[in-house]
Amino acid sequence: MKITTMLGDVLRSLLRPNSTQQYPAERQPDPERLRGKLVWNGEKCTGCALCVKECPALAIELITLDKAAKRFVMRYHIYRCTFCAQCVENCRFGCLQMSNTDWELAAADKSAFTVYYGKEHDIEMARSAQAASTKPEPAEG
């Protein structure tokens, strides 16, 4: 390579404006088909659990509190999710969507990556049942 060719390239690069975007100060609009965090609409859900069966990463759990009254809680493990949208495609009732606005999912601790969807009272019942089932039994002596 000739030195003059290389110097010409260097000078052109120095005179050209930067192409780097100053993220997050300068934000671009999110793409419409971006696959971000999973969003669940419990009003439409019938509890068929097809989304749970079809999730290849086992990121979704559907906790049934009362099937007749349609009381469900969905536990979504973001840290397991591959954002493939297989659950969204297989949901017959349209109660699952991939958000195109909520995609910045960094956090310092792992508890932020487990999301519960449902009514507050139902979520508390599901969490207390989970805590009771994982509590170790006292040793007999």
Image (spheres, rainbow, N blue to C red):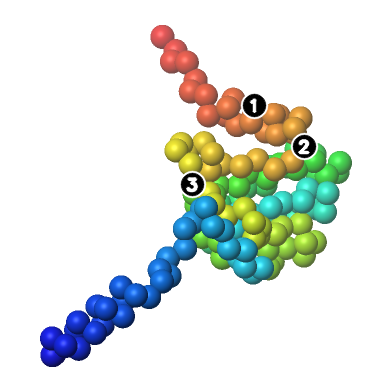
Comes first in the chain, label 1 or label 2 = 2
The correct choice, above or below, for 45 with respect to 140 in the image is: below
Amino acid type, residue under disc 2 in the picture: Lys
Residue beneath label 2, please? 119
The image quarter in which residue 83 lies:
bottom right
Element type at mark 2: loop
Q: What residue appears at the point 51 percent right and 53 percent down from the top-left corner?
A: 24
Amino acid type, residue under disc 3 in the picture: Ala
* Total residue callouts: 3
Q: In which quadrant of the rendered image does the N terminus lie?
A: bottom left
Residue beneath label 1, please? 128
Comes first in the chain, label 3 or label 1 = 3
Residue beneath label 3, please? 106
Amino acid type, residue under disc 1 in the picture: Ser
Q: Would residue 73 be found to the left or right of residue 59 on screen?
A: right
Q: Would residue 73 be found to the left or right of residue 55 on screen?
A: right
The correct choice, above or below, for 115 with respect to 56 in the image is: above
Q: Is label 1 or label 2 in front?
A: 2
The correct choice, above or below, for 10 with respect to 115 in the image is: below
